[in-house]
Image: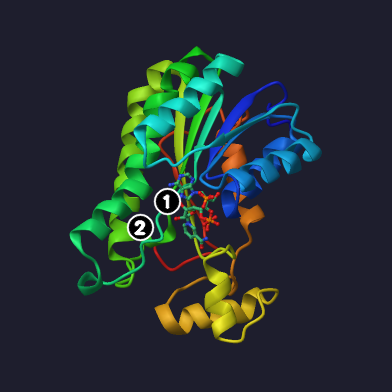
Amino acid sequence: MDLGFTGASAVVVGGTRGIGYATAVCLAREGCRLGIVGRDESRVSETARALRAAGSPDVLELAADTTSAAAVDAVFDQVRGRWGALNALINTVGPAGAGRLEDLTDAAWATTVDQAAISAIRCVRAALPLLRHAEWARIVHVTAMSVQRQSPGLIAYTAAKSALLSATKNLARTLAPDGILVNAVAPGPILTDWARPVLASAGIAEQDPAAAFQLLQKGHGMSVDLGRFGLPEEVATVIAFCASHANSFMTGAHLNVDGGSDFL
Ligand SMILES: NC(=O)c1ccc[n+]([C@@H]2O[C@H](COP(=O)([O-])OP(=O)(O)OC[C@H]3O[C@@H](n4cnc5c(N)ncnc54)[C@H](OP(=O)(O)O)[C@@H]3O)[C@@H](O)[C@H]2O)c1
């Protein structure tokens, strides 16, 4: 299937590691021009080299912290200067944010909401003139499976992701007259950097996603019908479709990429 990324442009916010990185690689292989946002400048450069090698004809290195409005504005100023328009905005930045009610101060809540929801909204606001200027445009947000199945240890994280989901659905309606399609993808447990120390401390090899999942199931009562962690690439392909020209009639959707779960 041709996703229609040849000649298109996309910004992947949080594109230097994990799910965002896997999404950027997926789009690079499709011939998409890419802007990559992350805080660590050297990692942004390293990622840009990998994306050029994977097939992207033009990669913009956009080192920035999305919790700063000025930095986000500067990112999309650079995109405007280089491309003048933007086909896809993919927001994958999320908070560290684990903790129970008693563990979290007001400041911790505010940080979590900023990283999970306001950062993404800030990027949408700054990118909107460019998205409106493109022949076709899509926005994709990354929420989490916990939005639909509460875990006491993720109270602020989940509330903040729920805010992002609500904004996603609102934006889908708001931007439909502009032909901008807005969707959210909800991953289950995915083997990215957060999981590595947890697995290492339990003596579990990260090459063994099934054993890794047993640990999560025991500790957090998580339900995943396929019985294993997912891999970033398995979420990336779904995000790529949502962000593509080939997605022409889905907006306001919340897609589970969680290996199957017990919520209805
Ligand atoms: N992995 C999972 O199991 C899982 C499950 C459900 C939902 N999710 C959600 O999926 C998304 C991606 O998760 P992941 O595990 O792939 O994350 P990850 O491996 O930690 O990667 C996060 C990416 O975002 C960048 N980033 C973080 N904070 C940023 C900021 N303030 N400004 C700019 N860039 C920032 C990071 O680069 P720098 O650190 O250099 O800035 C990195 O490129 C998150 O929203 C997460 O909540 C993940």
Label placed on residue 44? none
The residue that appears at 42% across and 33% down in the rendered structure is 71
Q: Secondary structure at mark 2?
A: helix
* Left or right: 37 as drawn, with respect to 32: left
Residue depicted at 76% across the width and 38% down the height = 29
> Which is more toward the observer, 263 or 177?
177
Q: Position of residue 256 (x, y in %)?
A: 49, 54
Amino acid tagged 1: Thr
Q: Quadrant of residue 35?
A: top right
Residue matched to label 2: 147
Q: Where residue 218 sits: x, y (%)?
A: 46, 84
Q: Quadrant of residue 159?
A: bottom left
Q: Position of residue 56 (x, y in %)?
A: 74, 32
Circle 1 sits in a helix, a strand or a loop, which is it? Answer: loop
User: Can the viewer see residue 135 in this picture?
Assistant: no
Q: CA distance from mark 2 to mark 1?
A: 7 Å
The residue at the point 28 percent across, 65 percent down is 155
Determine crowd level at label 2: few under 14, some 14-19, many 20+ residues with C-alpha closer than 10 A: many
Quickly name the residue at label 1: 143
Q: State whether residue 120 appears in this view.
A: yes
Q: Give x and y (percent) for residue 232.
A: 62, 56
In the picture, the quarter occupied by the N terminus is top right
Q: Is residue 104 above or below residue 131?
A: below
- Answer whether labels 2 and 1 touch (C-beta < 8 Å): yes
Q: Residue at x 52, y 64 (%)?
A: 260
Which image quarter is the C terminus in?
Answer: bottom left
Task: Decide which of 29, 14 is in the foreground and name it.
Answer: 14
